[in-house]
Image (spheres, helix red, strand yellow):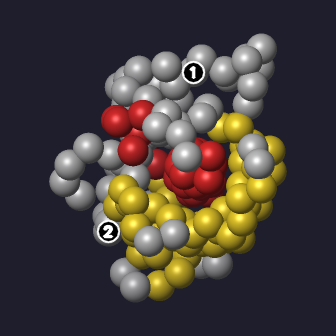
Amino acid sequence: MDGESVQEKHAPNSICFGCGPANADGLRIRSFPIENGLEMTFQTSEHHQAFPGMINGGIIGTLLDCHGNWTAALAIMADRGDDVAPCTVTARYTIKLRRPTPHGVPLQITSRIESVEGNRAEISMTLMADGEVCAQGDGLFVAVKEGHPAWHRWH
């Protein structure tokens, strides 16, 4: 996907393993707005495999977690009418691995805002490969306040 991702726009100095643009050794996901959520495409590397041809479940979890977290940040920002994305953290997330996720094909990940209430957002996520759902998840993500260890991580 072309253009500036939400991570590059709102947190160019982030070192998060999953979504930090400044982490050269991380996954460096790039999410883009769609109606009521975000979308992204991710191409796996050889070292993301659990066994030949299939992606490690921890990598799948990280992709969905970070993508969902950014969906929540933008949802809370919009709900508040702010210009700056709040720093959000994962309070809870669950992943259902529906089928092995293949290596070597683009992974399509979408997220949807289920609800926003104050500093909390419920998000659902889906990972597809070759037109099939490989993983689904949902999570609760929370905007943190000053004093929280993650408060300045995106700025």
User: Residue visible at 47% across and 25% down?
Assistant: 14
Q: Residues within 10 Å of mark 1 (few under 14, many from 20)?
A: some
Q: Residue furthest bottom?
A: 131
| Separation of residues labelled 2 and 1 (CA atoms) | 32 Å
Seen from the viewer's position, the closer of residues 12 and 134 is 12
Quadrant of the rendered image containing residue 42: bottom left
Quadrant of the rendered image containing residue 43: bottom left
Q: Is residue 18 visible?
A: yes
Seen from the viewer's position, the closer of residues 99 and 2 is 2
Q: Element under label 2? A: loop
Between disc 2 and disc 1, whose residue precedes? Answer: 2
User: Residue visible at 41% across and 39% down?
Assistant: 7
x and y, in percent, of residue 87 in the image: 61, 32
* Amino acid marked by disc 1: Arg
* Amino acid marked by disc 2: Val
* Badge count: 2
What residue does disc 1 label? Answer: 153
User: Residue visible at 52% across and 25% down?
Assistant: 154
Q: Is residue 49 left or right of residue 103?
A: right
- Tag of residue 105: 2
Seen from the viewer's position, the closer of residues 52 and 143 is 143
Task: Judge whether 10 appears above or below 127 on screen.
Answer: above
User: Residue visible at 49% across and 19% down?
Assistant: 155
The quarter of the picture where the N terminus appears is bottom left
Q: Is residue 111 left or right of residue 3?
A: right
- Tag of residue 72: none
Task: Judge whether 81 appears above or below 54 on screen.
Answer: above
Q: Element under label 1? A: loop
x and y, in percent, of residue 99 in the image: 59, 78
Tell which tag, 2 or 1, sits nearer the viewer: 1
